[in-house]
Amino acid sequence: MTETMTTPMTETDDAVAFRDVSMTFPDGTRALSATSFAVAPGEFVTVVGPSGCGKSTLLRIASGLTTPTTGFVSVDQSSLGYVFQDATLLPWRTVQQNVELLAELDGMPKDERRRRALESIELVGLSGHEEKYPKQMSGGMRMRASLARSLVLDPTVFLFDEPFGAVDEITRERLNDEVISLFMRKKFAGLFITHSITEAVFLSTRILVMSGRPGSIVGEFGVPFEYPRDPELRFDSHFAELCGEISHALRGAHS
Amino acid sequence: MTAGVEDQTEVSLTALGADESLLGETGPSGRPTKKNIVSSIVGPLVFLVVFLAFWEYMHLDGMRRFFDKPGFLLPSSVTVIDQSFLDSIVRQQMITGLAWTTFTALTGLAISVVLGITLAVLMAQARWLERSMYPYLVAAQALPVLAIVPLIGSVYGGGIGARIFVCVMISIFPIVTNTLFGLTSVEPSLQELFTLRGASRSTRLRKLQFPAAMPSIFIGFRISAGLSVIGAIVGEQFFRAGQKPGIGVVIEQFRQKARFPQVYGGLMVAALLGIAVFFAFGALRKFAIGRWYDESS
């Protein structure tokens, strides 16, 4: 990995830590200005911000796909789950084979990865669809398969890059319930990117509000609701209130 | 140069689309539909009847009226079939010719496939390699076979080796361009998925680029399959040495003797071979990638 990745951070046990990370693209676009935050183990942190505010860049830096211009990043690379904006399944592989892919690339023995794949497939509710090809499935099912693929590695850190932006609202809510139940079972540290405030509040323990280019974190909100979170929570007045405050903060960042 | 690749591929995709309607015997449910039976069987039959009628007319009257040429230059289709396929000696010549041409075309195609894919894999490894090799590939493609006939003849002799060489020369280009296009146009997010797990170049090639390129590779196969038949016949026109008379040789021999029905018979055989190869590769493609590849996307 890059130097910035391996540079030891301050002596924290944070699952993800950013210190003064900034990013300027070769064409001069400033995507991120000195950003610092941390995600502790067992925390689910969501970054909300408008399109093009650099929140995807932030996640790409966390995953190691992009090297920041300045600053220090510490993420446990060995056990990293990454969920892309779309399902990114290999169309020539069945669900089972797709779910096994990452483990296969890591050189996990065949029996072991098979067993884990079947387990993950069951966890995301795709049992019985193991032999289907992506073209035979709906967008929501593909996202589930994509989740299962990351679960196989049993990641301690899970990065989500606006994963449910392309599915309809009903499916999105169902997938959110799914993420909550996975979060409770697997106890990973989550870093989630979205532009949906409702989704952010529903999923997270903490929310970071990001301003537009160059992106920086302009607000932070704790989410007090207990897990497991009932789908009905979305209609709770406290829930609505918190959404309102975040919406306000977002607006403030842009006026 | 890159624009050239894309142009070629776009053309190929159009060809593919056109063919899908020919091969598409199945409806959305996967079962044959009435409409598709009409378009895939009845349509071509009606066209055949119209075509034969036009042919007959040209033989009886059209040749004289429009071109001021005698009708025997375009013999009646009945005469063609009678003298080419019902005459046992000529039929035997046609069958032998078909066998040799098929052999030449398939051998040439096999060499094109192996060599073409190898070249494309090499070129896909680095941008500078692609840039360095591409002009020569285009140059080789643009060379008129006719101009280098003496050269080919002196290197490969005048027999089947030279024919196979012509065949490869004519058919290799679409395989290289389509394979290269497929290998290099893998979705970036899929590439990143492999990057995240630190996949090596060869793993990436085997598990990502190659399978992703299969649909493009098959487009290349099919275009090249047709071209390899042309290549074989063109080769036979020039290189007739040795006791291996392909259909091109047969056509040329009958032409020299002004036996026109047999010339047209030979052309029919060549056309049928082209059709057979085209559909065979369509079927092969469906068999190989039809399970997962969505034609419409």
Image: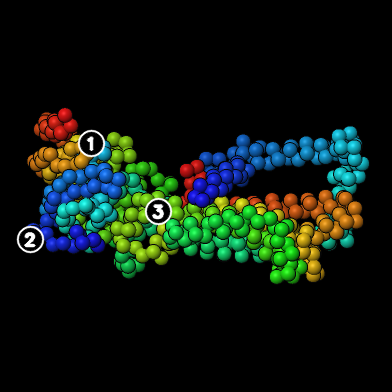
CA gap between label 3 and label 1 equals: 30 Å
| Residue drawn where x is 13% and y is 50% of the image | A20
Can you identify the residue that label 2 sits on?
A: A11
Q: Is residue A104 left or right of residue B118?
A: left
Label 1: how many Cα within 10 Å (few below 14, some 14–19, many 20+)? some
Asked whether residue B295 is in view, the answer is: yes
Viewer-nearest residue: B50 or B219:
B219
- The part of the image, by quadrant, that contains residue B74 is top right
Frontmost residue, B97 versus A108: B97
- Name the mark on residue A90: 3
| Whether marks 1 and 2 lie on the same chain | yes
Secondary structure under tag 3 reads: loop
**In contact (CB < 8 Å): disc 3 and disc 1:** no
Residue at (30% x, 45% y) in the render: A27
> Tag on residue A50?
1
Q: Position of residue B146 (x, y in %)?
A: 73, 57
- Of labels 3 and 1, the one closer to you: 1
Can residue B217 be seen here? The reply is: no
Q: Earlier in the sequence, mark 2 or mark 3?
A: 2
Mark 1: which amino acid?
Answer: Pro
